Amino acid sequence: MPLLEFFDELAEQETEDMMTVLKKFYGPLLQISMLFPSWKRSMIPVSLFLGFLYVSLIFEHIGILFYTAWLALLDEEYDLASLSAHYALLFIYSMFALVWVNKDRVLNNVNHTRFARDIATYKSGRIYSDERCEEIKKAINRETYFFLMIPGFIVIVANCLIMVPYISKWVVGMKNPYTPQGVNLNLPIACWLPFQSHAGFLHLAALSNQLTAVGCLAVIIITLLFLFIKYSQKVRYELKVLHYGIETLFKRSKRLYFKMYPERKAIRFHWTDPVYQRVVGICLKDSILHHKTIVKILDVYMTMLSMPVAMAYVFGTAVIGLSLLSILNALNQGNYPNVILFALLCVGEILNMLITSLIGETLTHETIILREELYFIEWHKLNVSNRKTMLNFQTAITEPLSLKAAGLVDMNMNTFSSIMNSAYSFFNLVNAQ
């Protein structure tokens, strides 16, 4: 059947190396979130069910929430309209992320398969086994755990946003759970529904539907952030190993020299030896090939994630500006629960963009260190041929590598600062009107 053949073609990407890396890096998250679903025949029913569940719930809530925002505007409930529009944008973003990442399924496979083994081969010996590289790996793992605390904190903030107002309504009670336009306020996410949903079985059905949709949304966004962190940290590790390779160029060259020519141990060693210089050239080219592989990985990486990051920046800027406006409006009305609600919303968006910008900054910083590391090697101990090779390498890394959102905006702390300024300017502009 053509459909089964199509699924079989998709399943070809699920190689043993690929699935080993995915399991090691992410556990079952990529399959559960449908960012890299399994299309093996035994898993087709599960993936189809999850895909249908995600798509149906996402589109259902996009429509309901935008309609709720419109009804809230008619009631002049601007805070409710802002909150509904924000949730709708999150669902739109999650749908876009699903489509975009699955579109690049082949590229995802290519890069993760590279990570299944050492991406660089050094003729002087396996550099990853060196004690210094093991220490680098441990340090990167510690940093990764720190970065992963931020998505964890975002999950806590999201739970507070959803459940705390809902629980407080049940504890305090509500005289009228509906707005004049029929929006049900007695749900975790206030929204319009085509039936009475403030109590009874229909309330439980609406509640279950919302919590399932929010769970799907959280799984997609957190997994995407998790993917970004793990991927970036792996690239950072490779860059640090490359730094070490450049730093120990002559040490490794000497070791390889005596390994290839053991009879020369009896001869007095000097760096001007043409045979030794040939070995230095071999080791230098190993580092250059390592760098080229990292550049290729980053190119594929940005093809996959640049647009989702760009959308996160755009949506985040608007949401932070609107949240600040809603906080000011709630303060003027003395509505302190809404002040806390929109403050948490603002914090969640800021943290999301902070971690994206911070990781982008660290990757760029590693490439700057690489340029400095190469500059400070003992280049005077290279012959003319190796000096030319080193100069070409130096020229290639003069411009530091940087992650770019949509290929336009650098992902660094300068961009984060600009976004905060833009959000505040947007708040001032809207507030002035």
Image: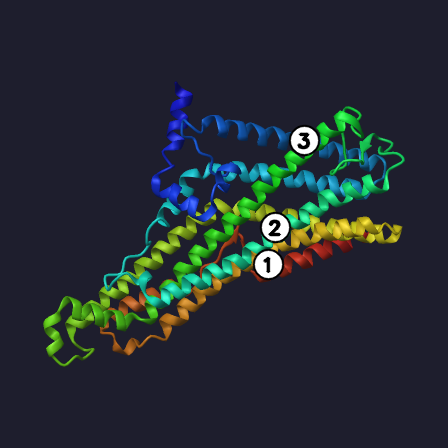
Q: CA distance from mark 1 to mark 2?
A: 9 Å
Which element is circle 2 on? Answer: helix
Name the spot of residue 77 as percent of width and height, x first: 83, 40
- What kind of residue is marked 1? Thr
Quarter of the image with the N terminus in it: top left
Numbered label attached to residue 415: 1
The structure's colour scheme is: rainbow
Residue closest to the eye, 24 or 251: 24
Name the spot of residue 117 as percent of width and height, x first: 33, 51
Check whether the beta carbons of the residues at disc 3 and disc 2 lie within 8 A of each other.
Answer: no
* Residue on which disc 2 sits: 313
Name the spot of residue 418 as percent of width and height, x first: 64, 59
Q: Residue furthest front?
A: 171
Q: Residue at x 38, y 37 (%)?
A: 14
Q: Earlier in the sequence, mark 1 or mark 2?
A: 2
Of the two numbered discs 1 and 3 in the rendering, the one whose residue sits closer to the viewer: 3
Q: Quadrant of residue 283?
A: bottom left
Q: Is residue 80 visible?
A: yes
Q: Does 261 sit above or below residue 406? A: below
* Residue on which disc 3 sits: 209
Left or right: 9, with 389 as reference point? right
Disc 3 packing (10 Å; few <14; some 14–19; many ≥20):
some
Q: CA distance from mark 3 to mark 2?
A: 29 Å
- What kind of residue is marked 2? Tyr
Left or right: 345, with 433 as reference point? left
Check whether the beta carbons of the residues at disc 1 and disc 2 lie within 8 A of each other.
Answer: yes
- What kind of residue is marked 3? Asn
Q: Residue furthest top?
A: 1
